[in-house]
Amino acid sequence: MSTLTDPPNESFRLSMLINDTRYRSLTFQVIAAVILALCIWYLGNNLIQNLRAAGLNISYNFLSDSSGYDINQRLVEYDSQSSHAKAALVGLLNTLLVAFLACITATVFGVVAGVLRLSNNWLVSKLMAFYVEIFRNIPVLIWIIIIFTIMTAVLPGPRAFRGDNATSSMLFDAFAFTNRGIYTPMPWFEHGLFASASMNWLLVIAGFVGSWFAARRINIWANQKQEATGIRPKTTALILAAWLVPFLVLMLVMGLSWEYPELKGFNFKGGIKIGGPLIALWFALSIYTGAFIAENVRAGIQAVSKGQTEAASALGLRPGKVMNLVVLPQALRVIIPPLISNFLNITKNSSLAIAVGYADITATLGGITLNQTGRAIECVLLLMLFYLTASLTISMVMNVYNASVKLKER
Amino acid sequence: MKKTMILGAMAFAGLAAGAASAGTLDDVKARGKLNCGVTTGLVGFAAPNANGEWEGFDVAVCRAVAAAVLGDSTAVEFVPTTGKTRFTALASGEIDMLARNTTWTFSRDVDLKFEFVGINYYDGQGFMVPKELGVSSAKELDGATVCIQTGTTTELNLADFFRSNNISYEPVPVETNAEAQQQYLAGACDVYTTDASGLASTRATFDDPASHAILPEIISKEPLGPLVRHGDHEWGDVVRWTLNAMIAAEELGVTSANIGEMAAGTDNPEINRLLGAEGTLGEMLGLSADWAKNAIASQGNYGEVFAKNIGEDSPVGLARGLNAQWTEGGLLYSPPFR
């Protein structure tokens, strides 16, 4: 027989919202949410009312008007008759280009400096410590300007290459280093399979992708053979052939030749120009962010217990293999998450481009277009949208990679 | 530069707060100081001198307005602005007026909602090249690298000029005149283009001005003048008529030297009205009767300001040209003080 009665079935009272721990947190969250919503509504409403009072309205029609200005670095066809939207696209591609290049080189600098900082060689490790401390403790804008200023001051102008007794000459008659940028020969196809050059290059890229699959296939085949017979067939020559043969055949068929830069009029013409602003921005972002990445790499390596290294050595692995097969795969788990934020930093810091006249999206859409049309709010909103999308995309890709290298729990 | 953008957006958000409040004239009087937007530094037009005091042709307009409104030509807070930041600074109310070699265009007047109160310098866009390049005409600039201040009308004129002449160029966008000068002298660009007055003023600061040539082509009309926010007509009138007073003073022969005796009363009723000896012009503007006298006494008339800062005897060395009085074949023509 039970003497216990059921707990009294209390009806809900308003005071329980504060006094009852079951509801209290919910109450405060609702209050906070309402206040936040009110703040946003107030700011938004204020903006709209003020704009209306000033006779301005939010409109994106200006994007289809012709821009009227020229841009010095264009990855797509563009002139002053193109629309503001096209100018924004040119800037967007320039931003992505410098961010992509800087992410790669910063990672290379960072990994090299991070690993070397742990070197047993006193001089090497101290040099790397010096690099890290100098570069990450000076603002990146200053690095951009210093590198650009040194480039324009030290390198000769195109005029120095002119005349019979020119003070400067081209390296191998193919490369010109000037204070406006570096000119290199440009490969092109004499009789491409397609009319447009970009289609031909796509074909080459497709060839590389095919080679990659073929090389993978060869490796899988070698692994199977090894598991079945215990002997691994020699694959080096096969893999080399898989990479080289399609490439060489394509080059021969399409007739690869080089266009060399030549001094014509005021500037070098022909070839590929890597502009001074791009170089300054790219290099500055790389060495600056590289210093941060170096510290991440060092932290990642030191996070792997020393017992792992010792155990691997005891098994007879050489130091290089210990690093590649045992330490780095475990260190990557610590390195990748902060690496993501470093990549995001590079992308966002590339907006300092205007300091050296590099036409990124902040300079075209957020600079000239904003100024010539006066559409500040529209342009800034678009810029925010772009940087947000770019950052979230980088985050997503890197998170997928992170998931693939993290500790698999089975 | 992202910071500027965000500031710009915030400034725009607070725009109506400035526009809807009491008139700028009352604000300036209450503050006891005029906030005037100028360039970040263009010798002759607006630049700090060795003592850190701003001086120049545009600065004189600011000081004249301060003298007219507050009776003190030193009660000015100079706010340096770049081609990119100037309009947001004015729209947001950070500055009361902008006197910064700004070209009067339709879209700035109508679409950006500003009010140009007049023209204090008739200019046009020109090109400067080193003489060693051997260029004698802008049409020979095919393929040249051109330094250009970003966010200005010159940027658009440049694109139009090269397109209509079917020649190519490569723009190097820079933020300020100082930056352009540095890049030009380092040879990072072959040509520097901006308003012809700006070129003359920049060249005056070079170590060797004689080795740089200004090409004969003037590719645009650039009427430069002070501007205020749209909609505040009382304040617009004050700035407009201060500028007109300086122009009219030159025409009427009133100078900073003889203004004392002129103000006591002359045979010319227009001078008397201008200097407050007759009529109530000052009162109509909401200022004291001696507003124009203060402005002219502190800065001199238009001709004196021109000669002192950018005239032929100054380092900048500009001729009056279009900026002479209408009586001498120029375009300066002040409406009557009546």
Image (cartoon, coloured by chain):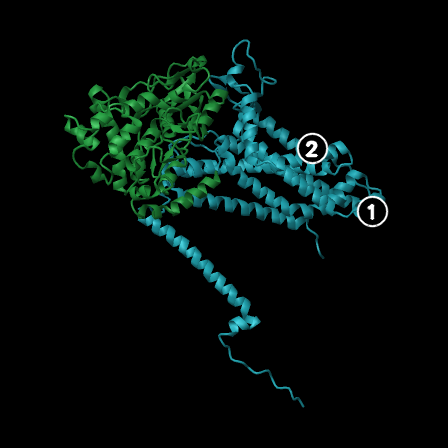
Residue B233 image-quadrant placement: top left
The reply, left or right, for residue A274 in relation to residue B97 is: right
Residue B91: percent from the left, percent from the top?
35, 41
Looking at the rendered structure, the kind of residue marked 2 is Ala
Looking at the rendered structure, the kind of residue marked 1 is Ala
Residue A84 image-quadrant placement: top left
Colour of chain B in the image: green
Indicate which disc residue A376 carries. none
Q: Residue at x 59, y 32 (%)?
A: A283
Residue A339: percent from the left, percent from the top?
63, 44
Chain containing mark 2: A
Residue B85: percent from the left, percent from the top?
41, 37
> Would you call the spot at circle 1 few (<14 residues within 10 Å), some (14-19), or many (20 or more)?
few
User: SS class of the residue under badge 2?
Assistant: helix
Residue B24 image-quadrant placement: top left
Indicate which disc residue A241 carries. 2
